[in-house]
């Protein structure tokens, strides 16, 4: 399976130099080194404020998987009906799912899906069930450092709680869509600051790859906070 520091698949690390506003057409593949993840976040910040951005529609990666939720909302042809949310198991067009899915199950399936497993974590839905999911945050992978996964989960759980995103009750497995994009960056600022605090408490207790990996993620978060908050 995949291991940290073996960025073989889409998570090719390093590579792209810092480009605050790289435009379009980069394959979604290479958006995952710390540097490039930061770029992705910055692009999404632009999107969150700018409304229309073809670049952001294409690239759904972000660091902690949140700002990208706002991007999908810009995709035309999807009507949201917040007032009409059936129960979890009401998914007639998905015969393979007969029971209400748990978040463990939903996140595990999302983790296996390259189109959903991005951004380090995120709010993922299956039908109307909304879940906070932990994905890989290079150089770390999900499950590698439990204390780190807790920090990510805590972060994503805040997105679930703040309820600025919504599921498509008729949809299958999908990323939640942001309701109010103008709130995205402020929320990210709050949550990332909190994540930094949690990491500062956790890092001294770590060893080896967890320690160095968490430190590098922490520094990336700090860089983003300093630039955007
Ligand atoms: Zn977030």
Image (cartoon, rainbow, N blue to C red):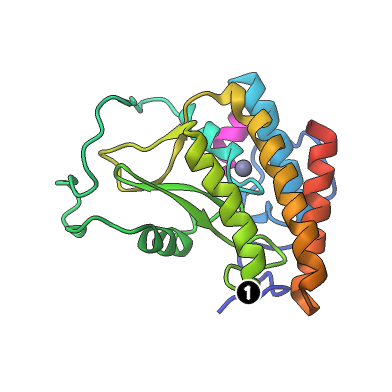
Name the image quarter holding the N terminus: bottom right
Q: Residue at x 44, y 40 (%)?
A: 176
Span of residues in magenta = 54-60
Is residue 16 in view from this perspective? no
Give 193 or 16, whichever is nearer the viewer.
Answer: 193
Q: Nearer the viewer, residue 196 or 113?
A: 196
Magenta stretch holds residue 86? no
Alpha-carbon neighbours of circle 1 within 10 Å: few (<14), some, or many (≥20)?
some
Asked whether, in this view, residue 186 is left or right of residue 156, the answer is right
Q: Is residue 17 left or right of residue 114?
A: right
> In this view of the protein, can residue 200 be seen by the observer?
yes
Reply above or below: 215 against 3: above
Q: Residue at x 24, y 47 (%)?
A: 88
Q: Secondary structure at mark 1?
A: loop
- Asked if 157 appears above or below 137 in the picture, the reply is above
Rendering quarter of residue 66: top right
């Amino acid at each position: 399976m995949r291991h940290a520091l073996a960025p073989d698949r889409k998570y090719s690390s390093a590579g792209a130099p810092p480009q605050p506003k790289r435009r379009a057409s980069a394959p979604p593949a290479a958006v995952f080194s710390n540097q490039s993840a930061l770029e992705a976040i910055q692009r999404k910040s632009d999107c969150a404020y700018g409304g229309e951005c073809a670049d952001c529609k294409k690239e759904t990666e972000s660091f902690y998987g949140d700002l990208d939720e706002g991007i999908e909302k810009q995709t035309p042809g999807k009507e949201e009906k917040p007032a009409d949310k059936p129960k979890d198991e009401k998914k007639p067009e998905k015969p393979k799912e007969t029971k209400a899915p748990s978040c463990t199950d939903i996140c595990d399936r999302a983790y296996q899906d390259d189109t959903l497993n991005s951004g380090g974590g995120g709010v993922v839905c299956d039908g109307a069930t909304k879940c906070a999911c932990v994905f890989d945050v290079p150089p770390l992978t999900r499950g590698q450092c439990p204390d780190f996964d807790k920090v990510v989960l805590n972060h994503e759980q805040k997105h679930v709680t703040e309820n600025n995103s919504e599921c498509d009750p008729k949809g299958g497995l999908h990323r939640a869509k942001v309701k109010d994009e103008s709130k995205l960056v402020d929320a990210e600022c709050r949550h990332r600051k909190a994540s930094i605090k949690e990491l500062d408490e956790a890092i001294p207790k770590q060893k080896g790859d967890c320690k160095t990996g968490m430190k590098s993620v922490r520094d990336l978060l700090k860089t983003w906070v300093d630039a955007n908050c």
